[in-house]
């Protein structure tokens, strides 16, 4: 039943909010982890209050562009500290324009050493094409985020979430690198797709050659050429090599998500970047089911309805979310 | 062999594994929230949360006992993984030598994974709550939460110390959280 009472009193919320910001503070955060554990152990409700406050913070971070603009306009009206680089009015209008497009771009110049830095983001269900400052092309998948930093010696792109397809302009003097999760992809003039989902990163090469290196272990690298695919697993830190086709690698650009023998959890992580309702898995045993097939991004519901014919699961279509749970009748072997 | 029941938990050794499974059910969300605070990235947080649970599972399979409470142990694993991840990022982001260590203007716009407009009642409450706060408090808060700027960058903009920025964000978060009433959230 609707519970309109606050589950936590103000002092407890304040303590939880204090931890929320303390853990975000890069200074001294390492030391405070032990104190944080003490705090959570002191009272069973502490961790619940922390989760309650965190969920709220995360929800504000997901507000749509209109709501965001409205709040920033009212409460941070002159939030343009960078007028050194761009006249205020121009900066504001550029920002407004790009926020409206779901993308934000910022340039900076640092004395004597040009640095170009930008962050691009897309919303759920939306792919976008980007041309980087060096002429390289990037197709960004739904609900994805890419930050780019070009310096005198290097072109570095970090895929913070989701999926992106890169067509890199060759320039031997400025190596192009993509960082995603725990790996770095070193490119040698080529086209490739990088996808983060459900605890793994997949690099699928359509042209040329790349070298994939696992961070923190110089010996752990794999080279992949056209129609090859490297998968890095966050849990095992293992790199594995397989094959792919251009369709599998970048079919999503035509709204076809193609999967060959991939865990359902990984498939859903991709599907969720295109679904207007999040699809959730209930029960760990479903996550490992292996799926091969095509999901049309504009008919995710149709795919979901067909799933019980392939897997022992049932689909509950809720108004705000879709839940997949084990079909107990089918899993029990009688 | 006839198993009396056939569920997720009995797939592996009973007893130990159900411990980790229960821990997962109870604390996965808090763990992801914790890691998201440390790392500022949901994708990284989910990745490391998963890794933490798998490490717990591996240790339990080996029959290792922890003197600690399992929850503290789990968060400690996660905290260590987060430190490693941050260290890795620092190594990758070492600025060129000549670069003036002036903070780069960096704005992160989070994608919108769930098209989530706030219920209109909550939206109104949020605005009212923000208006009740001192101007600096609400300003620091929206810059951090909506624009994803870190405390140092906001400190520069607002001409405050990073410590004061953190104080303002804390107060605003607690205040808004207290003022925006919600029906029981869907699990």
Image: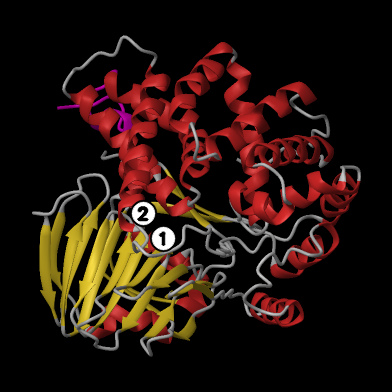
The x and y percentages for residue A129 are: 47, 85
Of A238 and A255, the residue lying toward us: A238
Above or below, A115 relative to A5: below
Of A285 and B156, the residue lying toward us: B156
Q: Can residue B12 be found in the magenta stretch?
A: yes
Q: Are marks 2 and 1 in contact (CB under 8 Å)?
A: yes
Mark 2: secondary structure: loop
The furthest residue to the top:
B67
Location of residue A158 (image quadrant): bottom left
Packing grade of label 2 (10 A; few <14, some 14-19, many >=20) is many
Q: Which residues are magenta?
A: B1-15
* Mark with earlier residue (2, 1): 2
Figure coloring:
secondary structure
Q: Residue at x 25, y 63 (%)?
A: A184
Q: Which residue is mark 2?
A: A198
Question: Is most of the magenta stretch helix, strand or loop?
Answer: loop
Location of residue B95 (image quadrant): bottom left
Q: Nearer the viewer, mark 2 or mark 1?
A: 2
């Amino acid at each position: 039943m609707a519970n309109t009472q606050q589950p936590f009193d103000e002092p407890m919320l304040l303590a939880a909010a204090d931890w929320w910001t303390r853990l975000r503070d890069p200074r001294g955060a390492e030391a405070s982890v032990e104190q944080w554990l003490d705090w959570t152990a002191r009272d069973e409700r502490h961790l619940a209050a922390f989760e309650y406050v965190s969920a709220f913070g995360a929800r504000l971070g997901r507000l749509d562009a209109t709501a965001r603009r409205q709040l920033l306009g009212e409460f941070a009206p002159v939030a343009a500290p960078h007028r050194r680089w761009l006249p205020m009015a121009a900066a504001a209008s550029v920002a407004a324009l790009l926020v409206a497009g779901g993308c934000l771009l910022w340039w900076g110049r640092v004395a004597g050493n040009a640095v170009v830095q930008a962050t691009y983001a897309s919303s759920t269900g939306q792919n976008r094409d980007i041309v980087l400052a060096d002429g390289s092309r990037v197709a960004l998948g739904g609900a994805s985020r890419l930050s780019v930093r070009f310096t005198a010696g290097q072109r570095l792109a970090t895929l913070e979430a989701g999926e992106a397809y890169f067509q890199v302009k060759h320039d031997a003097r400025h190596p192009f690198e993509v960082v995603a999760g725990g790996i770095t992809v070193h490119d040698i003039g080529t086209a490739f797709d990088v996808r983060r989902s459900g605890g793994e990163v997949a690099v699928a090469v359509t042209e040329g050659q790349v070298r994939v290196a696992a961070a923190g272990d110089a010996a752990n690298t794999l080279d992949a050429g056209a129609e090859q695919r490297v998968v890095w697993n966050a849990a095992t830190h293992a790199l594995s090599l397989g094959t792919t086709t251009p369709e599998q690698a970048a079919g999503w650009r035509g709204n076809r998500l193609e999967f060959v023998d991939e865990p359902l959890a990984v498939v859903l992580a991709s599907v969720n970047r295109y679904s207007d309702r999040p699809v959730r898995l209930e029960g760990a045993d479903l996550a490992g089911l292996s799926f091969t097939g095509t999901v049309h991004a504009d008919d995710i519901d149709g795919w979901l309805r067909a799933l019980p014919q392939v897997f022992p699961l049932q689909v509950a279509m809720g108004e705000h979310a879709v839940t997949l749970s084990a079909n107990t009748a089918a899993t029990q072997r009688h | 062999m006839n198993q009396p029941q056939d569920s997720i938990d009995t797939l592996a050794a009973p007893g130990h594994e159900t411990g980790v499974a229960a821990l997962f059910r109870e604390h996965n969300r808090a763990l992801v929230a914790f890691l998201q605070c440390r790392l500022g990235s949901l994708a990284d947080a989910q990745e490391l949360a998963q890794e933490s649970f798998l490490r717990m599972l591996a240790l339990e399979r080996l029959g290792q006992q922890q003197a600690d409470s399992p929850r503290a142990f789990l968060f400690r694993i996660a905290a260590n993984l987060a430190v490693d991840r941050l260290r890795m990022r620092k190594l990758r982001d070492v600025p060129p030598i000549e670069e003036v260590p002036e903070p780069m203007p960096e704005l992160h716009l989070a994608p919108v994974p769930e098209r989530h407009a706030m219920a209109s009642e909550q939206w109104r409450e949020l605005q009212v709550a923000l208006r009740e706060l001192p101007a600096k408090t609400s300003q620091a808060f929206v810059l951090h939460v909506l624009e994803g700027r870190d405390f140092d960058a906001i400190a520069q903009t607002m001409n405050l110390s990073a410590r004061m920025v953190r104080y303002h964000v804390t107060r605003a978060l607690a205040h808004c959280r207290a003022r925006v009433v919600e029906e029981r959230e869907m699990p």
